[in-house]
Amino acid sequence: MTNELRLGIAGLGTVGSGVLRILRDNAELIAARSGRRITPVAVSARDRSRDRGVNLDGLAWEDDPTALARRPDIDLFIEVMGGHEGAARASTEAALAAGKDVVSANKALLAHHGQALALAAESAGRVIRFEAAVAGGIPVIKALTEGLAANRITRVMGVMNGTCNYILTRMEETGQGYNVLFEECARLGYLEADPNLDVGGIDAGHKLSLLSAIAFGTQVDFANVEIEGITAITLDDIRHAGDMGFRIKLLGVAQMTGRGLEQRMSPCLVPAGSPLGQLQGGTNMVVLEGDAVGQIVLRGPGAGSGPTASAVMADVIDIARGIRLPTFGQPAATLRAARAARAAVAAPYYLRLSLQDKPGALAKVARVLGDAGISIDRMRQYGHDDTAAPVLIVTHKCTRTTLDEAIAGLAGTGVVEGPPVALRIEAV
Ligand code: NAP
Ligand code: HSE
């Protein structure tokens, strides 16, 4: 076996140590499948003294990941540090400039700089691949880029943040509130270094923007992903949704509409019996719809050392095999700038209000909604001990813009306490 592929690995945390473990445990089958031996040569992390649970003997150490990226004895640079600026960005750019191929698990970096990095890779004659960046171990980039390459993609949907799905699922299972389960996630080590990336929907928004680029042939447009996190979801919302046959999921939806590209990452109600509604715990699910294939559903572990390293190594093996695909499935120069369509597609909404329990209060709310052209499908007032009553309204289809205008109008009625919660009911 000739022509060894030599790796430099920047980052030896959850993902980087997982990559070294796979390379150690499955070296023979990887070499057989690649037709080449794939060998880690040099690594970088911040703390050289830390025990990584993997043997680093024989590997060169670089304190500076950019120096690692430029080493003449590596062919491929693996960036598994994280962060969309700083060391991750500098070392990735340096690797491409030095003529190395790159494999990254870093959704933030690709979401912010994907187009520039794709152009840089192509002008250097190199590739940059990122299967691990979206939905961990699920081979969704491969499915979109290769398996569905002949399809006009009509919609991409998914639950792509395991932490949020874990919190929402556990709220329903245990009856514990958001704050308790957030603390549980912190104890279990599920949260990103900045937890707002998870619960604020940003991490999942990064992932959706990458899938959109491939699905619709557009430049990554993370800035126009409409993002809403799960922090406002209460146990009552989960119970009320359940009463109506729905579950709440942090759901990403990207679709090309007549008005442009719609990208949303927000808590939505989905039918409890649907595949997305049944997704439990930290698992991810991505639903892809194409004109020829119809709908396919991919489900699996969205995070963790083994699953994420599995996806990193799939990219490495492709490169070892000589498979050199453009970053987003077509040459970067041919990707169109996306025209963003914010909240273009109408849907029914779940609206939860805290309404003062006095004569005429409900009528005032109905008037504001009616004046905005929003028709009420269902309405329910729950029993209460307080002076304010929890009221649930399910609207007929309306746009988010219209709903937001109506919500602004509700503040002027003098009978609605606090900000209402509005959740889209998604047809999945
Ligand atoms: P992690 O456990 O926090 O590990 C990060 C590693 O990067 C650490 O080894 C750290 O060094 C090293 N590092 C950070 N800044 C550095 C710098 N300036 N110079 C050199 N080394 C530096 O992170 P992770 O969970 O493995 O995630 C890595 C990447 O994969 C991120 O982009 C993440 O979003 C992505 N990802 C992770 C998962 C997952 O399940 N964890 C899933 C999908 C994608 P020290 O160890 O010395 O501090
Ligand atoms: N924080 C992410 C999640 C890790 O919870 O899904 C994988 O990207």
Image (cartoon, rainbow, N blue to C red):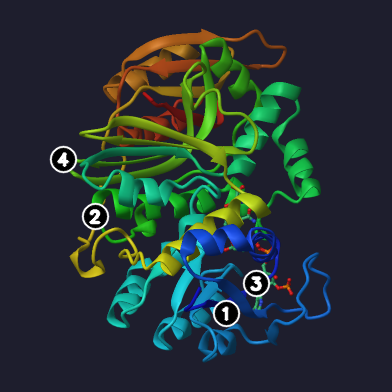
Counting residues from the N terminus, which is met first, the one under dot 1 or under dot 2?
Answer: 1
Name the residue beneath numbered marker 3.
11
For residue 227, say whether it is visible: yes
Describe the element under mark 4 as helix, strand or loop. Answer: loop
Establish if 27 lies above or below 351: below
Structural distance between the alpha carbons of marks 1 and 2: 29 Å
Structural distance between the alpha carbons of marks 3 and 2: 31 Å
Q: Quadrant of ligand 1?
A: bottom right
**Residue 346 image-quadrant placement:** top left
Q: Amino acid at mark 4?
A: Gly
Foreground: 8 or 114? 8
Name the residue beneath numbered marker 1.
87
Describe the element under mark 3 as helix, strand or loop. Answer: loop
Structural distance between the alpha carbons of marks 4 and 1: 40 Å
Q: Residue at x 67, y 36 (%)?
A: 167
- The residue mark sitting in front, 4 or 2, is 2
Counting residues from the N terminus, which is met first, the one under dot 4 or under dot 1?
Answer: 1
Q: Are marks 3 and 2 in contact (CB under 8 Å)?
A: no
Question: Whole-percent x and y of residue 416?
Answer: 52, 25
For residue 390, say whether it is visible: no
Circle 3 Cα neighbour tier, 10 Å, few/some/many (<14 / 14–19 / ≥20): many
Labelled disc at residue 217: 2
Name the residue beneath numbered marker 4.
258
Question: Whole-percent x and y of residue 109?
Answer: 48, 67
Q: Residue at x 41, y 81 (%)?
A: 96
Q: Are marks 1 and 2 in contact (CB under 8 Å)?
A: no
Cβ of mark 2 under 8 Å from ligand 1: the answer is no
Circle 4 Cα neighbour tier, 10 Å, few/some/many (<14 / 14–19 / ≥20): few
Counting residues from the N terminus, which is met first, the one under dot 4 or under dot 2?
Answer: 2
